[in-house]
């Protein structure tokens, strides 16, 4: 089988008639033979030979029933979908090396169908990861290099492994991470980040530690401020430490489908020059940050769906307040970089050159923080659990590698208070409620009564604003959304049913403080 040739079709004698017993479903064996054998033993067809060549691949399927193959390439192992170009090229090369020819497209597609069926029904199930994998008490980070190596981090430290037990997939645009080095410090990152305070720097490191853990929920990192404050450069620098990509910064997608396609093909989502967030995309970003699913009808199908369910680290930057909805800000870390004086500015080429010199050392320091987090997490406790409880516990476990215990908790609490102010200032209903309750300690009535009261208080410009509710049920829905930040500001909103008619009553009270 090592030295085989594709048999050519023998010439047909024009003076005789072909047998009439050949059926339409009988394959043309001579055109599809993969080996040169005797007429009594025609040998395997091309499809059969391709299937035999694919036996050298380790097959498996994901929980979503996608077929994958682990193949040997130049002394290392690669993981590819069976329907990917990479696996097709590998199988074609195996065939070409044996036959010095290419298979027919029909035989090739037939072989792929059998290989995929074996992956689905005759192979084990396993997860496949993108860039970072949290597996048991280990974290694996795909270096995305040509040898398919990964960083393995445990409570005992970190190392580079040639064959990680976690299976990774690669997508277009992914770029390699540098091999981390010992002896670095997270403070080496500070010169490349335009931050206002030490608390802002601590929260950026916290975002990196969460992203490199590979297990959500992830806080949404938001940079807002005037132009010239280095927001885009800062976002690109941070992505280069987690998930380098050719298209590091992108514009916001136009619909849910495009957003989840981007999340399926990239581990980190970075959206640049954001000018306000529509309600639908704000809700979708919340689902991506803390975990949520998305289903869309498969093309050319009436009933089948394509499902996506995962969490992703997210960064947003823009000049205005990028996010104003309370539920998004409750999941966010907000930063406003300060203006950079002209005499202190550097070119991006100069900054990237300096950063690349220390990137391996910074990544090594981050790996040490993750190892410390894996060691300390089982015994870590917080006095109070905020909205992003799992994220807060993880960073509290990591922080003793860099700062005194409690440093992160104080910085995060201060930032969350700032997020409450942004949420209340950016919501037209919240502003009206604060004015209403400032004049009296308590208000009580139905949603219709409250809407009528607020309509008399606001200006005509506010009344005809597209965000102002036109119906009582719209006002009630908005009140439920802004109730958490109002509660933190000392204003409590309760919904009850009273009287024989069981009318829905809204009670708004102001704290004495």
Image (cartoon, grey):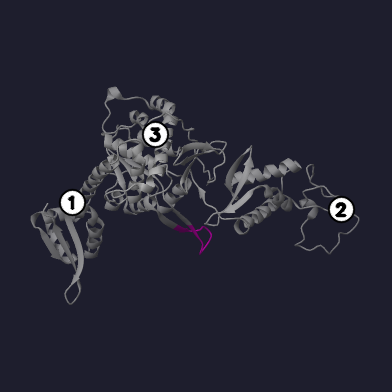
Where residue 296 appears, x then y in whole percent?
A: 46, 58
Where residue 510 appears, x then y in whole percent?
A: 13, 56
Mark 3: few, some, or many residues within 10 Å (few <14, many ≥20)? many
Start-end of magenta stretch: 295-306
Q: How far apart are marks 3 and 1 (CA)?
A: 35 Å
Q: Distance between the residues labelled 1 and 2?
A: 88 Å
Residue 269 seen by the camera: no
Name the image quarter holding the N terminus.
top right
**Tag 1 near tag 2, CB within 8 Å:** no
Residue depicted at 82% across the width and 49% down the height: 9
Which residue reaches farthest right? Answer: 15
| Residue 498 within the magenta-colored segment of the rendering | no
Give the foreground label among 3 and 1. 1
The secondary structure type at the circle numbered 2 is: loop
Earlier sequence position, callout 3 versus callout 1: 3
Instruction: Tell me the quarter of the picture where residue 445 sits.
Output: bottom left
Mark 2: few, some, or many residues within 10 Å (few <14, many ≥20)? few
Which residue reaches farthest bottom? Answer: 500
Q: Mark 2 points at which residue?
A: 39
Residue depicted at 31% across the width and 53% down the height: 279
Where residue 169 appears, x then y in whole percent?
A: 53, 45
Q: Mark 3 points at which residue?
A: 237
156 relative to 471 in the view: left or right: right
Work out whether 187 lies above or below 430: above
Work out whether 20 lies above or below 198: below
**Tag 3 near tag 1, CB within 8 Å:** no
Q: Mark 1 points at which residue?
A: 489
Earlier sequence position, callout 2 versus callout 3: 2
The secondary structure type at the circle numbered 1 is: loop
The secondary structure type at the circle numbered 3 is: helix
Where residue 289 appears, x then y in whole percent?
A: 37, 50
Residue 403 seen by the camera: yes
């Amino acid at each position: 089988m090592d030295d085989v040739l594709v048999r050519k079709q023998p010439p047909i004698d024009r003076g005789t008639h072909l047998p009439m017993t050949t059926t339409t479903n009988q394959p043309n064996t001579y055109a599809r033979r993969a080996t040169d054998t005797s007429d009594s033993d025609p040998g395997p067809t091309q499809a059969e030979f391709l299937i035999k060549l694919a036996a050298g691949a380790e097959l498996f399927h994901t929980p979503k029933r996608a077929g994958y193959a682990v193949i040997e390439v130049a002394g290392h192992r690669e993981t590819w979908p069976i329907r990917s170009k990479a696996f097709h090229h590998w199988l074609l090369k195996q065939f070409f090396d044996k036959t010095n020819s290419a298979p027919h497209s029909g035989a090739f597609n037939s072989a792929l169908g059998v290989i995929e069926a074996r992956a689905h029904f005759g192979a084990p199930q396993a997860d496949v990861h993108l860039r970072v994998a949290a597996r048991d008490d280990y974290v694996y980070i795909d270096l995305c290099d040509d040898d398919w190596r990964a960083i393995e981090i445990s409570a005992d430290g970190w190392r580079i492994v040639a064959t990680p037990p976690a299976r990774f997939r690669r997508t277009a645009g992914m770029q390699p991470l540098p091999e981390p080095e010992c002896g670095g410090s997270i403070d080496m990152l500070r010169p490349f980040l335009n931050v206002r305070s030490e608390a802002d720097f601590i929260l950026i490191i916290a975002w990196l530690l969460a992203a490199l853990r590979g297990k959500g929920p992830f806080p949404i990192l938001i940079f807002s401020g005037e132009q010239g404050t280095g927001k885009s450069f800062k976002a690109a620098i941070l992505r280069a430490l987690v998930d380098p990509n050719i298209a590091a910064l992108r514009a916001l997608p136009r619909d849910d489908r495009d957003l989840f396609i981007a999340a399926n093909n990239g581990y980190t989502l970075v959206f640049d020059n954001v000018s306000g967030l529509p309600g639908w995309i704000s809700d979708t970003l919340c689902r991506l940050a803390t975990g949520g699913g998305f289903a869309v009808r498969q093309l050319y199908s009436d009933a089948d769906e394509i499902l996506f369910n995962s969490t992703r680290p997210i960064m947003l930057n823009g000049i205005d307040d990028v996010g104003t909805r309370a539920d998004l800000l409750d999941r966010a870390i907000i930063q406003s970089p300060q203006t950079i004086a002209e005499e202190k500015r550097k070119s991006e080429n100069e900054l990237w050159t300096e950063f690349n010199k220390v990137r391996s050392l910074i990544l090594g320091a981050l790996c040490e923080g993750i190892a410390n987090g894996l060691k300390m997490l089982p015994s870590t406790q917080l006095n109070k659990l905020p909205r992003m409880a799992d994220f807060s516990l993880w960073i509290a476990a990591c922080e003793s590698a860099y700062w005194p215990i409690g440093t992160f908790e104080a910085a995060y609490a201060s930032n969350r208070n700032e997020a409450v102010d942004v949420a209340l200032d950016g919501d037209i209903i919240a502003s009206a409620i604060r004015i209403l309750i400032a004049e009296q300690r308590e208000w009580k009535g139905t949603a219709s009564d409250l809407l009528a009261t607020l309509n008399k208080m606001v200006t005509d410009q506010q009344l005809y604003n597209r965000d102002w509710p036109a119906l009582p049920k719209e006002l009630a829905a908005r009140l439920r959304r802004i109730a958490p930040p109002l509660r933190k500001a000392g204003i409590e909103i309760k919904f009850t049913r009273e009287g024989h008619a069981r009318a829905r009553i809204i009670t708004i009270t102001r704290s004495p403080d």
